[in-house]
Image (cartoon, rainbow, N blue to C red):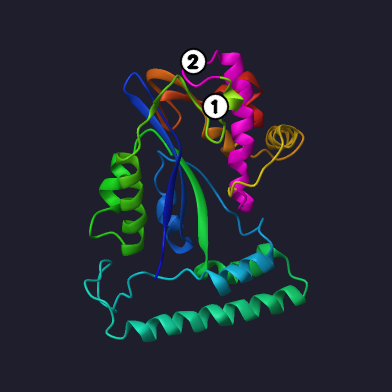
Amino acid sequence: MMTCQVSIVADTIRDGQRITTMQLRYWRAIHAEVLTHRRFSRNASSSRAIPIQKFVEQVETDLAMPSYWAANQSGMSPTQEVENKEAAENWWRECANLAARQARIGADLGLGKQVVNRVLEPYQYITVLVTSTEWDNFFALRTDPAAQQEIQEIANAMKSALENSTPVERNFHLPYVTDAEIGLVDGDLDLFRFMDLAKLSAARCCRVSYNKLDGSPSSFAEDMQRFERLVDPSHPLHASPLEHQAVANHNVRSRNFFGWTQFREMWENQHNPDQY
C-alpha cells in the first residue's frame, strides 16, 4: 500500500497574505502531475544524485506501489479495482525485484547512477520541497474524485496539513532556518540580514536533491560553500533553491508568488540577469 508524508517546514503570514513551504514524500510516478502546477516552487530528490545501492535498498525495503489497483476501463478515471488485489501486488513486487536485479547488473557493468537508477524509478518514493502562496487550484484539481487516487492522497494530506497549521506573523520566510539562527522569535528582519540568512536557507533547500532533508547536520561554512556553488557564474547555475525564501510585499506579484518577493528575483536583480 502506498504511503505519502507531508510536513510543514515554514508557514508565514503578513498582511493576510500567506506563504507555506511543505516537505513531501510520495510515489515518484505521480511527480509529473505535481510539476504541472506553475504556482509552485519545487526541488526534488534526484536519480542522478543518489547512489545506486541506496536506490536498490529502497526498492527492497521500502517499495513504492499504487494504492489503488485500477481495473482496465475506458477513460482516465477508473471506477473499480481488480478483483484479486493480492495478485496485483505480488506482480508489482516481482517487477520491482527484477528491476533491482537489473540495476545491480548495470552497476557491475560500470554504468552510472544517471542511467541505472532510471529502471528503479517506478518503484521509488520521491522527496519534494514545495513553496507556494496559492494552493486553491491545486487542491481543486487534485482532490477531485476524477484525479488519480495516489495524487488525491497526497493532495488531501497537504490540504489537511495547511488547514491545521498556524502561520507565524513575520515579514520574512526562511525554510530550514531556526529562530536561534535568525536571532529573534518575533519581529522583522532588515533586508541585509534577510539576504544573508536566505543564502543559508537556499543551501539547505538544495539538499533535497540528494535526499539529505533528514535532519542530518551541516555546518554554517558547508552551507555557505554550497550556496556559492549554486550561484557561481563560472559554472552552470542552479538557482531553483533560491525560490523558497521571500520577503513580504503586499499585493505584489513576484514570479510565481503573490504578496511576497522571491529571493531568486532579488538575487538576479542584484547580479547580471543574463547569467540566470
- Look at the image and give the residue range highlighted in magenta: 184-212
Tell me if residue 191 is in the magenta stretch. Answer: yes
**Residue receiving disc 2:** 188
Q: Residue at x 22, y 59 (%)?
A: 145
30 on left or right of 144: right
Q: Label 2, label 1: how many angstroms apart (C-alpha)? A: 12 Å
- Helix, strand or loop status at disc 1: helix
**Residue receiving disc 1:** 179
Q: As drawn, which residue projects farthest toward the top? A: 190
Q: Position of residue 235 (x, y in %)?
A: 75, 38
Q: Position of residue 111 (x, y in %)?
A: 74, 70
Which quadrant holds the N terminus? bottom left
Instruction: Tell me which amino acid carries mark 1.
Output: Asp
254 on left or right of 18: right
227 on left or right of 19: right
Residue in the foreground of this view, choosing between 111 and 180: 180
Give the answer, above or below, for where 29 lies relative to 90. Answer: above
Q: Is residue 268 visible?
A: no
Q: Residue at x 59, y 33 (%)?
A: 201
Q: Position of residue 16 (x, y in %)?
A: 31, 22
Tell me if residue 205 is in the magenta stretch. Answer: yes
Q: Residue at x 45, y 56 (%)?
A: 31
Q: Is residue 12 visible?
A: yes
Tell me the mark number nearer the camera, choosing from 2 and 1: 1
- Helix, strand or loop status at disc 2: loop
| Within-10-Å neighbours for mark 2: few <14, some 14–19, many 20+ | few
Q: Residue at x 64, y 81 (%)?
A: 101
